Amino acid sequence: MTALKARDVPGFLKKPDLKSGIVLIYGPDAGRVRETTDQLQKHFQGKDADPMNLISLQFADLDNPDATIETEANTSSMFGGQRIVRVRGATNALAPTLERLAAENVPAILLVEAGKLTPKDKLRKVMEKAKSARALPCFADDARSLDQLMREMFRENQIQIDNDALQALKDQLGNDRQITRSEVEKLILYAAHSRKITLEDVMVLCGDNAMLALDEIIDSAGTGHVQKLDQALSRAFDSGIHSSAILTRSLMHFTWLRAQRAKLDEGAALDQLVNSARPPIHFSRKAKVQTQIRTWSAQNLSSACARIYDAIAQTRKNASLDLAHTRQALLAIATIAARH
């Protein structure tokens, strides 16, 4: 068996026992999956790595994923060194190909990133059975591991943070490693000269991460990014954001889009609609919101709002299925956006 327990992953990252083969990195925390893969990539590249030896692929974007990945895995390096094939967003559909490659003992290292996988998922099962593969679980952080991550980041950058500031930061952050790292990096950059972070700094600079998570969900749905939406929903559920908050925020957003689309059809300028929004839209979202106003029709926006209304009603009738109804409704909306 080549399945690693969560407690075994740090040891493997320090000293991987593979020189070639496949490493599956999976889990509900996309930030931690990416971070773990980055660490493995750095290890296998070594010093003075040839950038030509790194092949980065997005599984959903490949026209013929099986042939592409198999070809890249069996292609020898032109100038020597370890060839690394990194595959993002893998699903169970890739399992037969990886099973075949694991049996062939390919010369490359394949770093395969996936979302949450159960023991019954084929992708996980075949990698756990293969001798030339390793399966690494990346579970959501708990309070202790996130505290350790923050302290290490501040210490490595020689930044002093007051105890009350650190506690306030922990209180504001959920258990998403990607969001935590992003917020800490922002504080480190801010304190590059002062080398000190106070409680006031944290309160001013670190926004409501629940709202950031909700923005990611509605923008992924509104722009038709189904995979990003699915990952954002999983992170939100795992961090404790209730489905009612997601559905309410989604309904507010798509109702607002209907009003803006009507104004656009009447001749209003797109950038003016976004710039005059209240509360103001963060600059990082403006392009996404403009795309949604421009591409969604009035009829489709009406259908989207109806789907959310129905999901709210269904969750109130059967609270035990609230996550399923929420996911189903928003994925349906994202599919509409993707088609248009």
Image (tube, helix red, strand yellow):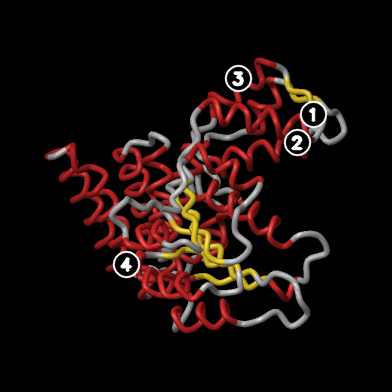
The secondary element bearing badge 4 is classed as helix
| Residue found at the far right of this picture | 193
In primary-sequence order, the first of circles 1 and 2 is 1
Name which residue lies at 55% across and 54% down. 285
- Relative placement, left or right, of 279 versus 253 is right
Amino acid type, mark 1: Ile
State the residue in front, 79 or 295.
Answer: 79
Q: Residue at x 16, y 44 (%)?
A: 313
Quarter that holds the C terminus: bottom left
Q: Which mark is residue 167?
A: 3
For marks 3 and 4 on the same chain, the one whose residue lies earlier in the sequence: 3
User: Residue 259: where, in percent of width, then height?
Assistant: 37, 57
Spatial CA span between label 3 and label 4: 46 Å
Asked whether the beta carbons under mark 3 and mark 4 sit within 8 Å of each other, the answer is no
Instruction: Tell me which label, 1 or 4, sits earlier in the chain.
Output: 1
Contact, mark 3 vs mark 2 (Cβ under 8 Å) = no
Q: Mark number for residue 159?
A: 1
Query: Could you tell me which secondary element the residue under label 3 belongs to?
Result: helix
Above-or-below relation of 245 to 69: above
Query: For this view, does 125 lie left or right of residue 39?
Result: left
What residue type is disc 2 on? Ile
Q: Which residue is mark 4?
A: 298
Foreground label between 1 and 4: 1
Kind of residue at badge 3: Gln
